[in-house]
Image (cartoon, rainbow, N blue to C red):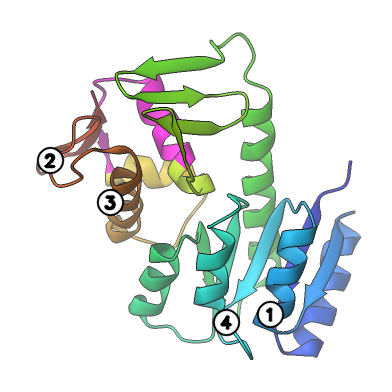
Amino acid sequence: MAHRILVVDDEKLIVKGLKFSLEQDNMLVDAAYDGEEALRLAHSNDYSLVLLDVMLPKIDGLNVCQQIREFSSVPIIMVTAKGEDMDKIMGLEYGADDYLTKPFNILELKARIRAILRRSAKKEDPGERNPRARFRDLEIDYESKRVFVKDHEANLTAKEYDLLELFSENPGKVYSREELLNTVWGYDFPGDARTVDVHVRRLREKIENNPSDPTYINTKWGVGYYFT
């Protein structure tokens, strides 16, 4: 089955070029030119990935990302014309999984999309792994990629789930931020340790009773993070 991608950008020439290039890789591409249209399409369709520009008419990309996260864990790559770190961090804060800064190389974008889609496919084929695991009040369903805290579902982003899956399958193993970037993001990601810190903090907010005093994802000061 072909992957379906939602491209959101108010510059029609950019959308036209992205659509043409992605369709050459046998992907189905829908286009939206403002935030309202993007939300309508995201609600109505099952996408493999959303490529979302920050600067949009009607509703900006950050708010679109935040609203999508209220009902979907679809991977989101944010695109910003600004090179400032704060824009990138804000995108991650709002639930994005990755980001690119304009102008970007189409080959780099396609490599990132393929990497995300490969990881999604692997998670859908867990092999001989136990399909569910429970850690006190936390339950992980590896087949459906759903997480429950005290029997209530936690709406994790794709990257937050990837981190939790990695941690939970390797309890006690301390991962440095660099190891997490390489393992979870899976390519030469241009981010830094703050990218990991943002995702770990957001994950703690969703699964810990007290995020400032975590019981699942702990910090080994000066080294990294580990799962108890």
Q: CA distance from mark 3 to mark 2?
A: 11 Å
Q: Secondary structure at mark 2?
A: loop
Quadrant where the C terminus sits is top left
Q: CA distance from mark 1 to mark 4?
A: 22 Å
The x and y percentages for residue 71 are 59, 54
* The stretch drawn in magenta includes residue 16: no
Other-residue count near label 4 (Cα within 10 Å), few / some / many at <14 / 14–19 / ≥20: few
Answer above or below: position of 43 versus 167.
below
**Marks 1 and 3 close (CB-CB < 8 Å):** no
Which amino acid is tagged 3? Arg
Q: Secondary structure at mark 1?
A: helix
Q: Mark 1 or mark 3, which is nearer to you?
A: 1
* The stretch drawn in magenta includes residue 164: yes
Which amino acid is tagged 2? Asp
In the picture, the disc for residue 82 is none
Q: Quick one: label 2 or label 1, which is nearer the N terminus?
A: 1
Q: Residue furthest left?
A: 221
Q: Mark 3 or mark 2, which is nearer to you?
A: 2
Residue 183 visible to the viewer: no
Which residue position is annotated with label 2? 213
Answer above or below: position of 102 versus 100.
below
Q: Quick one: label 1 or label 3, which is nearer the N terminus?
A: 1
Answer above or below: position of 133 versus 108.
above
